[in-house]
Amino acid sequence: MSSLTMDRDLSRVPQPIVKKLQALIRRARLVTIVRGLLAVMAATLGALLVAMAVDATITIFSSTGRWVLSLAALASVLATGYWFLIRPLARTFTLQGIARLIETRHPELEERLSSAVELLSSPDAPELKGSELMIAELAKEATGQATIVVPEREFSFDTVRKYLVAVLSTAALLLFAWVLWPESTSRLVNRIMVPFADIGNVRETDMVIIPQDIVLARGDSLRVEVTVKDDRVRSARLLRHQGSQSESSDRMIDMSADADGNPRFSFSLPVVDEGFRYRVHAGGGLSRFYKVTVVPRPEVEQLEVEYQYPAYTGQGTRKDDKFEGRIEGLIGTQVTVTVHSNTKLKVARLQVDGLPPQNGKITTAKESKQSVCRWQVALTREMIGGRVWTLRLEDKHGFVSWPQEYTIRAIKDQPPEVKIVKPLAKRLEMKSTDSLPLSYLATDDYGVAQVELLTTT
């Protein structure tokens, strides 16, 4: 907004004239600002209503179309703001200019105001301006005439009345629509104001879509069903957008109507290996995008087992990195099973037939960020005949690993064997003073700690 231009020396101009003209300039600017603001408000509401009507009438599939509609509405508002607000306020108001404007409305002033301001503020030499006495008399008459000029009457707010009516009319239409159709009106306003937002069109509310956003395990099937609350609809299409590919369109299969006679449609994918986004178009309704997220089903990537043998065996511990699920060890052995999964787990459970399930201790690998689970199982006599054990891995989405059975068996510790190797004869006759050298062989699975010779008489 420009300020008052004081390009001349106004000290000789009578103050009543200066103050009156400055008051006229301020009033003119105030009326211009109010008129411009009302015009911008009316243009904003009008453009919004027109854009809403277009969006409600035409099915806009691409985001580009929504951007064009929103930017067109914005452009009309900006053009109105420039024409009614910026452009008028950019003009410079001078005392001479406002005086001439007032004199065009009041011929009876006979250009005394503008002439007085021009002559008294002119830097020209006195001989060029004319008689000082005549100029003083002109200034006196102009001062008297300035009192009859009223800024509020010269620049009345009556000129902005039509803009106020336009604002109130468009606002009333918008409010009326909001009262009658609050959800639809809010949806249309949001689609115009936020063209990048993923919002279905106004007819989306006629559709009930199942399952909407969903997370699937890789390889699972997907079935999308839609019920349309409009018995005139005869077909529906599922629009898919996968990766960088262009959007595909698939016709949905007709289903029997629901209890209220509303048409229903479905679309099925037997195997889903990659995630995608989809939306449904039925009649004039176009839904927002729904996201199908595909995650790997929990599974075992690597099995490890560690056997801690009973202390008396002297075997210590043994680790098997190439473990494939078959557990076999001496009774009393403590077995530690370690599983590396392909994804993060929420629950990991080991179940041995006939025993309560055991929840594993879950940690996260530093490098892969995947889960590592551990269990400890003691081999007991009850497992001599062999049993089946299984793993149940569950992630945060509730997906469970496919069942897979492994075996576990406990082995008895066989008793040591002792064999006399010398003498070979089982019956000997000897004197009481003779000595009998004995040689024997003692064997055991895990070694012999002590041998005692027992004799009877």
Image (cartoon, rainbow, N blue to C red):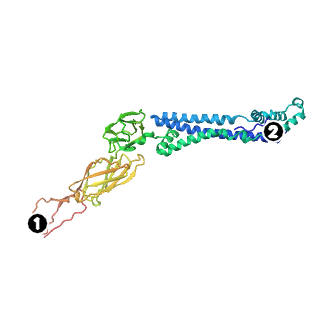
Left or right for 103, reference 346: right
Residue at screen point 49% across, 36% down: 53
Q: Where residue 79 sits in the image (x, y, percent)? A: 60, 34
In depth, the one of 148 and 214 nearer the eye is 148
Residue at screen point 52% across, 36% down: 50
Q: Which residue is mark 1?
A: 430
Residue at screen point 15% across, 64% down: 436
Three-letter code for the amino acid on which mark 2 is drawn: Gln
**For mark 2, does the 10 Å Cα neighbourhood hold few (<14), some (14 to 19), or many (20 or more) residues?**
some
Furthest toward the top, the residue is 128
Q: Is residue 5 above or below residue 340?
A: above
Q: Which residue is mark 2?
A: 145
Q: Where residue 293 sits in the image (x, y, percent)? A: 39, 42
Three-letter code for the amino acid on which mark 1 is drawn: Met
**Quadrant in which residue 242 is drawn:** top left
**Quadrant in which residue 214 is drawn:** top left
Q: Is residue 432 above or below residue 441?
A: below
